[in-house]
Image: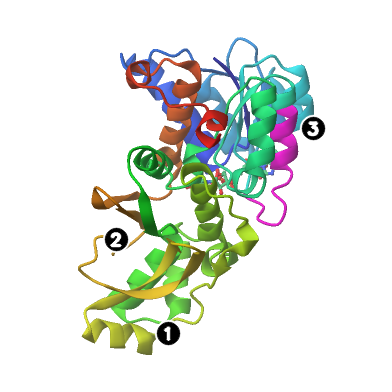
Amino acid sequence: MQLIIIGFGNVGRSFLKMIGEKKKKGSNKFNSDLKAVAVLDRKGGAVDPNGIDPEELLKIDTKEGTVAAASNIGQLGLSPLSAIKEIEADTVLELTPTNPVNGEPAITYIKAAIKEGKNVVTTNKGPPALAMRTIVDLASQNNVDFRFSGTVGGGTPILEFVRQTVEVDEVLSLKAILNGTTNYILSKMYDEEIQMNEALKQAQLMGYAEKDPSLDINGIDPALKLTIIANYALKREFDFKDIRTIGITGVNLDKIRKDKKEKRKVKLICAIKKDAIVAPQSIEISDPICVDGSLNSIQLKTKHMGEVTLIGPGAGGYQTATSILGDLLAIEGTSYYLKQSTIPKVHEALS
Ligand SMILES: NC(=O)c1ccc[n+]([C@@H]2O[C@H](COP(=O)([O-])OP(=O)(O)OC[C@H]3O[C@@H](n4cnc5c(N)ncnc54)[C@H](OP(=O)(O)O)[C@@H]3O)[C@@H](O)[C@H]2O)c1
């Protein structure tokens, strides 16, 4: 499968490293011949129809700060739209930063790729949270696939967990911790009894929080994820703007200390019953979703199975790269497991 990779940051670099390593090891579970024929960042791209050498590209990018500096194959100023239109490939990996306001420019890239008959895999929350129905319909009309497993839970298969549960049981309610950054901050405040500013600084030093942490702190990131879960996995037509979203800025040490005495912890909880909400909530320490550090967790209350919980790392380059790989194998139909069962295309799952 020939790939165009748009965005070569933490996720894109980890993905390319991972497929390079897997090919070297000749993993027998990895039957697919995945080949990056173009890789782009904001300055331009590197293009090689025979397949780009991952190690060489990573070296150049680390040294020069752009893939466009690659000798012989580098193209300064190459734009994502030109690459999508002009370069032959089966699938586009859209890995640019999340824009929670209008999902751009990713939505434009994704629509262009689909119209060119290319499948799309994205880890960017903007497009599936803000334009899922439009993109899925376009993909269906053009007979290509659009997948986004890495948008929720990083490598932890939260979307498939919910979707598969919905298929076999009635989900009565959902509650989850979907943002590793705020969970890390709240855990630090609890463990070390430090102020939020201090905990945020530590999260930034550890690489868990961005320089501008507002998307996490204000609850926007988990609200985008909850929108994706609701629309794709729960098949509920939820608008991102309808989710009541309250961030963690109002949580203080007094509240944390009071909770401690009552064997509770305050967490940024995403919940869906009739309505959807993202807000800080004190939950019992013994509650299975009460995880610490940068972990994510999700619990479904169902009619027949009762309560089912999934816990795992919610982000990370390599973790998220495994989701991309899973999506690609699903598109290609080369996954051993997918030959036994079938994960439907998103438009089939949604219909
Ligand atoms: N990191 C994680 O653990 C994680 C987990 C799940 C989902 N995600 C999502 O996955 C996406 C990628 O995350 P990341 O951590 O890899 O981000 P990142 O490290 O900030 O990298 C973003 C990349 O996109 C490039 N880029 C930005 N705007 C572009 C444009 N208009 N056209 C072409 N390239 C553009 C950047 O180019 P320059 O290098 O030139 O700036 C950079 O290479 C985001 O939407 C993020 O929310 C991330």
Circle 3 crowding by C-alpha within 10 Å: few under 14, some 14–19, many from 20: few
Residue 309 on image: x %, y % = 28, 52
Q: Of discs 1 and 3, which sits in the foreground?
A: 1
Residue 145 marker: none
Amino acid type indicated by mark 1: Asn
Sooner in the amino-acid sequence: mark 2 or mark 3: 3
Secondary element type, mark 1: loop
Residue 77 marker: 3
Residue 133 on image: x %, y % = 65, 40
Spatial distance from mark 1 to mark 3, Cα to Cα? 47 Å
Spatial distance from mark 1 to mark 2, Cα to Cα? 21 Å
Total marks shown come to 3
Please tell me whether residue 101 belongs to the stretch shown in magenta. Answer: yes
Q: Of discs 1 and 2, which sits in the foreground?
A: 2
Q: Quadrant of residue 295?
A: bottom left
- 200 relative to 24 in the view: left or right: right
Residue 97 higher or lower than 120, as above or below: below
Q: Residue at x 30, y 63 (%)?
A: 292
Q: Which residues are magenta?
A: 98-113
Quadrant of ligand 1: it is top right
Q: Are marks 2 and 3 in contact (CB under 8 Å)?
A: no
Residue highlighted by disc 2: 289
Residue 252 marker: 1
Q: Residue at x 36, y 90 (%)?
A: 254
- 26 relative to 119 in the view: left or right: left
Amino acid type indicated by mark 3: Gly
* Quadrant of image for the C terminus: top right
Residue 203 on image: x %, y % = 43, 65
Sooner in the amino-acid sequence: mark 1 or mark 3: 3
Secondary element type, mark 3: loop
